[in-house]
Structures are given as structure tokens and as C-alpha cells.
Amino acid sequence: MSSTSTARWLNRMASDQYCLLHILAFFSYIPIRCSTSHLLLPSRSSLLFKREIQAVIAFSVIAAVKTVRAETWQTVVSDSLFFAKIFLTALALVMDYHLALWYALVFIVIHILTQQPPYEGLGNSIQLTPLQLEALLTEGNTSRFWLVEFRALSTSTCICTSSFFPELSITYSNKNLSFGVVDLGLFPNAAEKFGISLASLNQLPVYILFENGTEVTRFPELDFQGTVFSSSITKKILCEHFELDKHLLDYINGK
């Protein structure tokens, strides 16, 4: 991800309601801590100070590891906020269990009312309705291959992987291979037509490669009973599964 797009995305995150409410919740600990310090027993105050230092060190290590290992900023933010909420609630519990319950309630309300923003760019992929996708696959006068992502941005997995497809489309799209996106959150009735079960939204996203209108392969794969094999999704796994490097090489060689 370029520094410009990263700065733009972080600026949007800072102005987003989801992040703003989390920031307010986290920083509220500072005035609460200062205003109640004189009410705590010396032993409790000393214990709380030690736990604060431990929490800061532990969170810093976890955040650093996640930043290095995660492929997207969406995953970094999601995981960092998750651990930050755990540490803050634990610190509040040391201070007073009523405060811990209030923080737990606040985080539950934020989770219900807001949603982490996904990556907004499409790269060289095309946002499609199910009817548009059917028309493209049926007419056969466009690309020979279509790689389509079926997603629902109401799920955390789809949000955390929302930048994969646009980035892959920028690298691998050509006259023979096109990329499309269908939002099953907007068109849930189209899921069954493409063999996707919405019984559990955690199965999304699903990626299907079509050749001349016929499905060639998909990821995650289905077993003979139609059950989805759960697997972590990374750009490397998608490249290997759909042989994107081979498609690009074939295009370069004029095949």
C-alpha cells in the first residue's frame, strides 16, 4: 500500500464514527484515572500502576507484531482495537468492577451501532449487480476469464480482506482476465444461484473464477456435501489458487 493511500485511509479512519467513538472511550480513562486516584488505597494504587505499565508494554508488543504480520491496515486496526478493549476493561476492573462493567457496556453499544470502515478503492475491478454479472458471463464478448469476489461488508472477514481484490486487480487484470465484485449484502437472493450459502456469513468472501461463462474453480472450496473448507485468506493464497501469475504470463505471451 502506498504512503499516499495509507495517509488517505488513516485520515478517513480518524474521521469515521467507529474510530472516533473508540478513541473517546479509550481517552476517557485518563480523566477517570486522575479524578479517582485519591480515592484508591495506596496498595490498590500501586497495583494499578504496575498493571498499567504491563498493559502498555503488552499492547505495544502485540500492535507491533500485528503491524508487521498483517497484510492490511483493516486487520491491524481490528486486532489492535480488540486487544486495547481487553486491556482497558482489565485495568478498569482493578480500579472498580462497576467501571469495568460500564466500559464493557460502552464497547458493546459501539459494536452494535457502528462498523469498521472497509477499504473503499476498487482498483481495476468492477462493482457488479448479479444481473450485470450474468449478462457478462452469458454474452461472452468481454474477457475470457472473470474472477469474481462475492462479499458482504457487514462481516469482519470481508472488511479485513477488502483491499486484497483491488490490489490484485491492479496487478493482474488484462484483456483476458477481468475482476468483478458482487455485494451479497445488497443482493442476498443471488447467493444460491452461484452456489453460495448465506446460512453463515462467516463463509464470505467467496472467490469464483469463470472461463467463458462457466465456473472453473472457487475459493474457499466445497467438499462433496457442499460444505465450505474454511481457510485463511491472503493475497498469496489467492494468487496460487487461481494461478494469477500464469494468467498474466499467458497474456504477455499472447495466448
Image: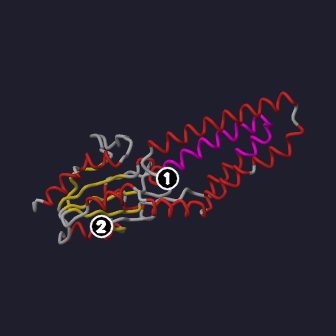
User: Viewer-proximal residue, 198 or 113?
Assistant: 113
| Residue receiving disc 2 | 133
155 with respect to 38 (left or right): left
141, above or below 198, in the image: below
- Image location (x, y in percent) of residue 172: 26, 59
| Residue receiving disc 1 | 74
109 with respect to 10 (left or right): right
Dot 1 crowding, Cα within 10 Å, few <14, some 14–19, many 20+: many
Three-letter residue code for mark 2:
Leu
- Image location (x, y in percent) of residue 70: 45, 45
Three-letter residue code for mark 1:
Gln
Q: Please tell me whether residue 94 belongs to the stretch shown in magenta.
A: yes
Q: Which residues are magenta?
A: 75-104
> Quadrant of the image for the N terminus?
bottom left
77 with respect to 187 (left or right): right
Residue drawn at x 64%, y 39% is: 86
Dividing the picture into quadrants, the one containing residue 113 is bottom right
Residue drawn at x 66%, y 54% is: 23
User: Viewer-proximal residue, 84 or 192?
Assistant: 84
Select label 2 or label 1 by which is in front: 1
- Image location (x, y in percent) of residue 27: 72, 51
- Image location (x, y in percent) of residue 149: 34, 57
